[in-house]
Amino acid sequence: MKTNIHPQFYSEVVVSCTSCGNKFTTGSTKQSIIVEVCFKCHPFFTGEHRFLDVKGRVDTFQKKVEMAKKYKAAQSSKKHAKKQKESKSLKDLLSEI
């Protein structure tokens, strides 16, 4: 097995839930873990019928889509500027000399 390719493993990692405030320890490659829903407040484990807030996932996706649109616009403007800069005819080049 190769050496020095495996991530650091932390045996005492604190997992904290943002909705109910529950904290417990586990082992992981991350130093701390923050979750939105844990086993103490998830409807499947508690037996309650309630809707979870999935707005965060939708908002995250919409932010990614907006960033992609901005990135595409910036890239197309860069390509357009580069194309205009490079597209000179032979007559134009000779007249500059």
Image (cartoon, grey):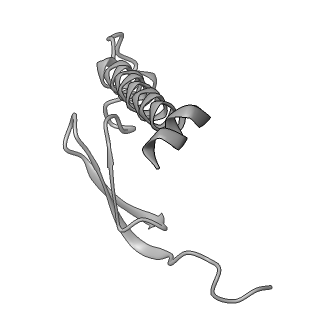
Residue 60: x percent and y percent? 35, 27
The quarter holding residue 51 reads: top left
In this rendering, does residue 80 appear at all? Answer: yes
The quarter holding residue 6 reads: bottom right
In this rendering, does residue 88 appear at all? Answer: no
Residues 83 and 4: in front is 83
Compared with residue 3, is residue 86 higher up or lower down, i.e. above or below? Answer: above
Residues 29 and 2: in front is 2
Residue 2: x percent and y percent? 76, 86
Number of disc labels: 0
Q: Residue furthest right?
A: 1
Residues 92 and 12: in front is 92
- Quadrant containing the N terminus in the rendered view: bottom right
Compared with residue 79, is residue 31 higher up or lower down, i.e. above or below? Answer: below
20 left or right of 81?
left
Residue 19: x percent and y percent? 22, 34
Residue appearing at x 38%, y 31% in the figure: 74
Residue appearing at x 63%, y 87% in the figure: 4
Residue appearing at x 34%, y 34% in the figure: 37
Q: Residue furthest left?
A: 21
Residue 86: x percent and y percent? 52, 38
49 left or right of 18?
right
Residues 56 and 14: in front is 56
